[in-house]
Amino acid sequence: MRLWIGLYLPRLPLEVFAPNWSTDAGLVVLEQERVLAASPLARAAGVQPGMRRGGVLMLMPEARIVERSPEREAEALHAVAMALLQYTPQVAQAEESTILIDIGASLRLFGGIRALCRRVRASLRALGFSGQLSCAPTARGAWLLARRRAGRVLTIESLTRRLDRLPSTLPPPARAYANWFEGIGCFDIGAMRRLPRPGLQRRCGRALLDMLDAAYGMAPELFEWIEAPTSFQAKIELFDRIENAEECLQGAQRLVQQLTGWLCAHQLAVERITLLLDHERGRVARPPTAVDIALGEPTWRDEHLVRLLRERLAKTVLDAPVIALALEAAQLQPMAPPSESLFPEPGGSEEDRVRMLELLVARLGPDNVLQALPQADYRPEVANAWVPVQQKVRESVRSAQMPADVQSLPRPTWILAKPIALLMRNHRPFYGSPLKMASTPERIEAGWWTEPQTRDYFIAEGQDHTLYWVYRERIVGAGEDADPRWYLHGLFG
C-alpha cells in the first residue's frame, strides 16, 4: 500500500531562533521590515503579521526583533529530513517548509500508522521543532492535508471527500487567482474540480491541474529523494552561551537524531561518538571540550546514545561557556541483522545487557566497571585479571582454560586480593578458631620465570564449620623461620 506522511512546520521561522519560542519574551521575526511571525507574548502585546518594525517597538519596546533567515530554515529542514531517514529512505523536501515521507513499506516494521506518527512527532520534538502531520495515499494529498491540519486518511475515496472540502486557495498555483475564484463562488477544491478543465487551464495554467491530478491520485508523482552524505558530521550554533554542561543535552539530542537517520540510511551502527563543545573564538579562543562515548556493542538507537550523553554531561565541568556543538561518528560497523531466535531470551537480550554496562560506565567511570580476564596460569592470584568492561578482548584469550585436572579441583568463591598470614597456636593455624585440615594437599609450583611459588593448599574447617582455603609455604628459612608459614587465601560459600 502506498502511503505518505506530510509534515508541515508552520513555526519554523520562530523555532530556528529559539527552541522555547512559545515562552520567549517577545520574539518577533521580520521579513522585508514587516512582521512575519511572533511569539505568543508578542501577539498578546498586540503585534500582528504585516506590522512594521516601528509599530512593534511602539507596542513592545523590549521585543527581541530578528530578521528572517532562509539559510537557517533550510538547514533546519535538512536536519529534520536527515532524522526522518530512520523511518524510510524515501524522504523529500517540498515547498513551504513541508517534508513528504513515503512510509507505505514501513508500517509493519513500526507497528502501524498511529505508532509511526507518534514516533515521527517524538523525533520532531527531540529536534526542537513542532509541526502538523497528515497521512494520505498520495504525496500531494498529504501536503494539502498537512497545510490545513486535516488529519489522516488511508483510502482514495476518503481522500477525495477530505480534499473536496479544502479551500480553493490552498494550492499554491491557485492563490494568484483568489479574487476570480471568489467572484464565481468557487470556495473549495471540490467546486474547482467541477469547473470545465479546458477553461480552468486557460485561466490558471497547467500547474494547477497537474497538482490536483497528483493529489487525487490521477497522475504519477516524482520526487528527488534526500540522500545521506557518505560521512557524518553535524554542528549547531547555540542560541546563547551555556555555562553548565548539562544544558547542552537538548542540542546534543538534535545532533543524535540526525546521526540516527544517517546510520539507518547507510545501514550502519556506531561504536564511538565524540561530542565537541565549542568555546569562544577569536583572541580568547580555546580548544573544544571533547565528550567521548565508547560503546561495547555497536548501536543505531538514539535513546541509548542520549542516555549515555546525559550521564557524561552531568559529570563534565566546563572551563568556558559553550557557543556551539558538533557531533562526529568516529567508529562505524555494519548494522547487525535482527535476531533469528524464535523466542526472546530470558532476562533480556545480549544487547540489553551491553546497554546496561555502558550506562554504568557513563555514570561510574570506565575504571570502576571491570570484566574478568582469565589467564592460563596455575597461580591463583594470577589466574584472573580485571580490565575495563569496554576493552576489547580476543575470544581466544577470553576462552583460555586451565588443564582438565585443575578444573576439577575445588576453588573458593572468594579469593582474597592479598593472602593473610595466620597465627599458629599449638602447631595449628588459627583464624578465629583453630583450623582443622579437611582435604589432602594440592601442590602448586609455578612462576619460576618471575616470582617462584611453592605452596601446599588445603581446605580447612573452623569450629563454626566455615571452610577456608589456606596454604603452607614449602620453602622456609632457617632458625626462627624454620617453621612453615600458613596463609589464608580464600573463603568458600
Image: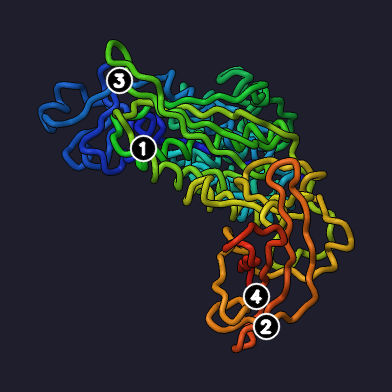
> Looking at the image, is mark 3 or mark 1 earlier in the sequence?
1
- Expressed as whole percent of the image width and height from the top left, the position of residue 417 reads 58, 58
Residue at mark 1: 19
Tell me the amino acid under the disc marked 4. Answer: Tyr
Residue found 64% across the figure and 63% down from its top: 482
Q: Do residues under tags 4 and 2 come within 8 Å of each other at their CB atoms?
A: no
Kindly identify which numbered label has been placed on residue 468. 4
Q: State the separation of the CA atoms marked 4 and 2.
A: 10 Å
Instruction: Indicate the quadrant containing the C terminus: top left, top right, bottom left or bottom right.
Output: bottom right
Helix, strand or loop for disc 3: strand
Tell me the amino acid under the disc marked 3. Answer: Glu
> Looking at the image, is mark 2 or mark 3 earlier in the sequence?
3
Kindly identify which numbered label has been placed on residue 436. 2
Report crowding for label 3: few under 14, some 14 to 19, many 20 or more residues within 10 A (C-alpha): some
119 shown above or below 258: below
Q: Do residues under tags 1 and 2 come within 8 Å of each other at their CB atoms?
A: no
